[in-house]
Amino acid sequence: MIARIQRWTLPVAAAVCVVVAAAVWVVRPELQPAQAQTPAQARASFAQLVSEFSEPNGEFDTDNLISNERSYLHVLPQLEQGGVSGGVYIGVGPDQNFSYIARIRPSVAFIIDIRRDNLLLHLLFKALFATSRNRMEYLSLLTGRPVPERVEGWNDATIEEIIAYLDGARPAAVRPSGTSPARTSPSGTLALDRRLQDAIRGFGVPVSAKEFATIARFHAAFVDSGLSLRFQSFGRPPRSYYPTFRDLLLETDTKGRQRSFLASEGDFQFVRSLQRRDGVIPVVGDLGGTHALAAIGRWMTERDERLSAFYVSNVENYLFRDGGFGRYMENLN
């Protein structure tokens, strides 16, 4: 079985539903063993898949640094009831995918988005996973706050305790390159930390100087706004009902359980492990395009992999509007 996770836009909040449908790929429980590759081979494979599966960059009028879907976790009890787990996960957008991945525990995940900016954002996330030991360090680096001393002592902290620390901390002061997770220059602009740049270069995906500046701008937005960051549409102020990053971290499922991947150290460590094995692969592509989604499908078919969940947000609405829904259905089949 596969789960299709879809967002329907409502006047005040986003509602999420799940539709369970027949599998479109043959079931096979395990992925081809990545451990058989050397680290260099695995890294080359990651970059190769990103390159081979991606389409040319598309445009959209939002930054999508975080989700605007307040109810993004409400679908989780239905996924659990349907026994959705393992296999291959496909999703769109930023880091709400990690909470679905933490629940489903796939062997590999593809994040497909029409904007190359989303790929760049996921390279930033991947670099943060590569340099962070736990949730506390990850969120400290992401928001440019000083990493607490004895950060390992935060492993059992609640998400409320982590948020309280971050809300009470100021962005790290200016320091020499490589000594601070993020540093604010006298003009208030943020320079991407050398460790993160080096990590991103090590992933093997070509990133231009201009794109590194874009990644630094994304990071600066998290530092400047902290946990009060909201989804932003270009040329329009954030809607008052858009959740903050803080809201998304504290969100619960319909049973009242905090289920963000950052609410549990175990969930965070699963996503971190999958990232460090190059098992979360960002791809530039239109779901109604001619290449990316079909290429992922062919890759799965060649390996007898099954699709466990497909998170599409509200992309299908745009595909209907723009005439791409037919091609999208062909890609699924």
Image (cartoon, rainbow, N blue to C red):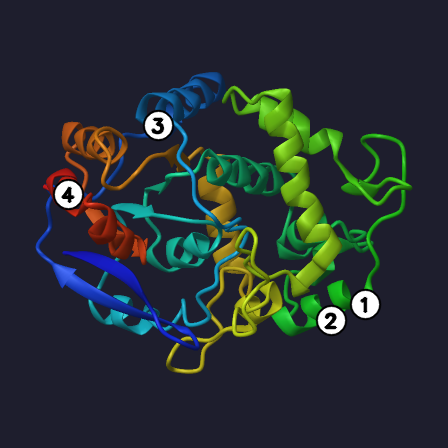
| Viewer-side label of 3, 1 | 3
In the figure, residue 197 lies in which quadrant? top right
Q: Amino acid at mark 4?
A: Leu
Q: Earlier in the sequence, mark 4 or mark 3?
A: 3
For label 3, the residue is 54
Q: Which percent across, then down, holds residue 18?
A: 23, 66
Secondary structure beneath dot 2 equals: helix
Q: Position of residue 319 (x, y in %)?
A: 24, 49
- The numbered dot on residue 168 is 1
User: Contact, CB < 8 Å: mark 3 with mark 1?
Assistant: no
Q: Mark 2 is on which residue type?
A: Ala
Q: Which mark is residue 164?
A: 2
- Residue under the point 59% across and 62% down: 237
Q: Quadrant of the N terminus?
A: bottom left
312 with respect to 158 (left or right): left
Q: CA distance from mark 4 to mark 3?
A: 17 Å
- Estimate how packed mark 4 is, as few (under 14), some (14 to 19) or many (20 or more) residues with alpha carbons within 10 Å: few
Residue 148 figure quarter: bottom right
